[in-house]
Amino acid sequence: MKPKPKKIKATAVVKAKSPKNTLAYYECMCHQTQQGLKGKKITNACHECKHNALTINAKMSATKAKAAQKIKAGYETMGQGLAELIAASK
């Protein structure tokens, strides 16, 4: 009599979900750690970045854009002043 073949149980492989946008996640983590975690645990910061990286980065990039506009306006003003100085010295 032949022995019956044993049934093999399939094991489920659980994969960790990666962030939707890896670059945004790492930029978010970089910003959070540079500013200091301010009493937050690192796991909470990771969770926030994993789920809200794009919105957090959008807020931070908005402040960078405002600063860049101020710098641009300052250079334009300086350029006009130099143009007037050169015109007056001729």
Image: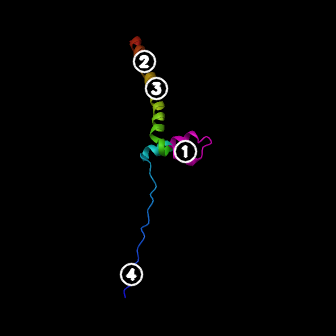
Give the main secondary structure, helix, strand or loop, of the magenta stretch.
Answer: helix
Foreground mark, 3 or 1? 1
Magenta-drawn stretch contains 57? no
Foreground mark, 3 or 2? 3
Mark 1: amino acid: Ala
5 to 87, vertically: above or below: below
Mark 2: amino acid: Leu
Q: Which residue is mark 2?
A: 82
Mark 3: amino acid: Ile
Of the residues under marks 4 and 1, which one precedes in the sequence? 4
Structural distance between the alpha carbons of marks 3 and 1: 31 Å
Q: Residue at x 44, y 20 (%)?
A: 78
Q: Which residues are magenta?
A: 30-48
Screen quadrant of the N terminus: bottom left
Of the residues under marks 3 and 2, which one precedes in the sequence? 3
Residue at the limit of the structure toward the left, as seen here: 2
* Residue 67 located left or right of residue 39: left
Image x and y of residue 85, in percent: 43, 14
Foreground mark, 4 or 3? 4
Foreground mark, 2 or 4? 4
Label 4: how many Cα within 10 Å (few below 14, some 14–19, many 20+): few
Q: Which residue is mark 4?
A: 4
Q: Which residue is mark 3?
A: 71
Q: Residue at x 41, y 12 (%)?
A: 89
Structural distance between the alpha carbons of marks 4 and 1: 54 Å
